[in-house]
Image (spheres, rainbow, N blue to C red):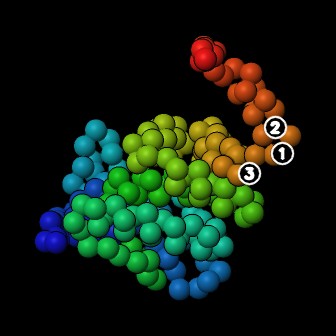
Amino acid sequence: MKLKQATLGFGCPDSVDPHHIVVTIPRGRDKPVRIVEHFGLRAGHAGLPDFLERVELDRAKWTAIADIVRRVFNERLKEKGHATSRWAIGENKVERLLGKELCVLAWAVEYAPLELVPVAITNWAGLKPEERWWLFTMTAAATGGIDDGNIGWRKALRFALTENPVRGEIAPGRAKKTRMRLQEDLPLFPLAKASS
């Protein structure tokens, strides 16, 4: 399969100053990972800054999400005929829409207990890209900066992705009530008995 456009990192166009996300992974295992949106040539237009620091994740949370994010992004890049990538120490460039999706997951886990990160990953992976972009847009509009982590949409996003039960994780009593309710409601129109 012929590769379409030359890219750097995770799908970032290899062109003059594109709008993209940079994930900086420091050498020390105790140092946090920083995710920054760079507006590229759009910087300065309509008041856009050159860059905006979006989130900082402690290393344990980054390690918990890094592999699934890499796999999801690489699957999408392969589908579009682009080169795949991996996370490396230093700056990792990410195409702007993929970067927005990464921010959604990072925002959801930044203040969540480590044991809830797998739930957030499962719920995030179950969203369509367009749903992730919408969540990014809504969250970034009011609480998209590095210091906005525990308020408004950021807090709501954390609860939405970490406290929504995923398949197979519904409490037994709750599952039983749901099943009973479905049996009572369905079918809407009782089946006619077949005549013999």
Q: Is residue 122 left or right of residue 72?
A: right
Name the residue tied to disc 3. 169
Q: Locate the C terminus and report the quarter of the image it occupies.
A: top right
Q: Is residue 128 left or right of residue 48?
A: right
Name the residue tied to disc 1. 172
Q: Where in the figure is residue 106, as x and y percent of width and height? A: 56, 58
Q: Locate the N terminus and report the quarter of the image it occupies.
A: bottom left
Q: Residue furthest right?
A: 173
Q: Does the rendering let one see residue 37?
A: no
- The amino acid sitting under disc 3 is Glu
User: Toward the viewer: 69 or 20?
Assistant: 69
Q: Where in the figure is residue 116, as x and y percent of width and height? A: 72, 58
- The amino acid sitting under disc 1 is Pro
Q: CA distance from mark 2 to mark 3?
A: 13 Å
**Looking at the image, residue 140 lies above or below residue 28:** above
Q: Is residue 93 left or right of residue 181?
A: left
Mark 2 or 3: in front is 2
Label 1 near label 2: C-beta < 8 Å? yes
Callout 1 secondary element: helix
Callout 2 secondary element: helix
Q: CA distance from mark 2 to mark 1?
A: 6 Å
Write the residue at 64% across / 42% down.
Answer: 160
Callout 3 secondary element: loop
Q: Earlier in the sequence, mark 2 or mark 3?
A: 3
Q: Residue furthest front?
A: 196
**Looking at the image, residue 20 lies above or below residue 136:** below
Q: Does the rendering let one see residue 144?
A: yes
**Looking at the image, residue 47 lies above or below residue 107:** above
User: Toward the viewer: 156 or 53?
Assistant: 156
Name the residue tied to disc 2. 176
